[in-house]
Image (tube, helix red, strand yellow):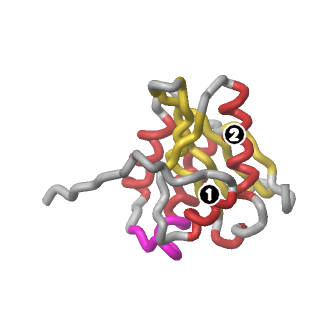
Amino acid sequence: MAGDGMIRAFAPEAFGACRALFIEVFNGEPWHDNWTAETAGACLRDITEGQRFFGFTLWEGDTLIGAALCHGKTWCRGREAIVDELFIAPGSRRKGYGSALMEAVEAYAYEHGLTSIALLTDREYPAFGFYKGRGYRESKFMVWMYRRIE
């Protein structure tokens, strides 16, 4: 891996650092979201407290610089891994850290007999090109649909 980051299995002690980094990342460029400590904490608890949760954190010394938060799901062709969130600190991007986290997810999936990895991303953001470059492809059949309730 580029740089000197260390990947660790997600531990509950990392929750606060993950929440702070999640807010920093997604409230910044290019997303401009509006996460608060409360909403980000609830979102991350929804993921990390799930029955089949697994995840990885990426550290430079004592500083969290990235995370991949995932869960397993049973599908008709076997169990698959779903990448719920992957985020890297703004100053640590384009150094190979996202690839290192995805390699950890892929190794976990392989070691646990998962048959595929799925994720959602937006075509408008750099993550789309990142995943395409790692061999992920758009589904010809699946479409994520959304309806706002007002």
- Magenta region includes residue 32: yes
Q: Along the line of sight, which residue is nearer the eye, 108 or 53?
A: 108
Q: Which mark is residue 131?
A: 1
Determine which residue is flagged by label 2: 106
Q: Is residue 88 above or below residue 101?
A: below
Residue 64 at least partly seen:
no
Q: Along the line of sight, which residue is nearer the eye, 19 or 92?
A: 92
Which residue is drawn at the image coordinates 61% and 51% (left, top)?
Answer: 136
Amino acid at pointer 1: Tyr
Amino acid at pointer 2: Glu
Provide the secondary structure element on which disc 1 rests. Answer: helix
Q: Which mark is residue 85?
A: none
Quadrant of the image occupied by residue 37: bottom left
Q: Earlier in the sequence, mark 1 or mark 2?
A: 2
Number of residues whose C-alpha sits closer than 10 Å to that of mark 1, classed few (under 14), some (14–19) or many (20 or more): some
Seen in the image, is 80 located left or right of residue 45?
right
Which residue is drawn at the image coordinates 22% and 56% (left, top)?
Answer: 147
Quadrant of the image occupied by residue 117: top right
Seen in the image, is 15 located left or right of residue 74?
right
How far from the left and from the top, in percent, is residue 118?
Answer: 53, 43
Quadrant where the C terminus is found in the figure: bottom left
Q: Along the line of sight, which residue is nearer the eye, 1 or 24?
A: 1
- Magenta-colored span: 24-33
How far from the left and from the top, in percent, is residue 18?
Answer: 58, 52
Provide the secondary structure element on which disc 2 rests. Answer: helix
Q: Circles 1 and 2: CB distance less than 8 Å?
A: no
Q: Main secondary structure of the magenta part?
A: loop
Which residue is drawn at the image coordinates 69% and 39% (left, top)?
Answer: 106
Seen in the image, is 121 located left or right of residue 99?
left
Residue 135 at least partly seen:
yes
Q: Is residue 124 above or below residue 63?
A: below
Q: Along the line of sight, which residue is nearer the eye, 37 or 101?
A: 101
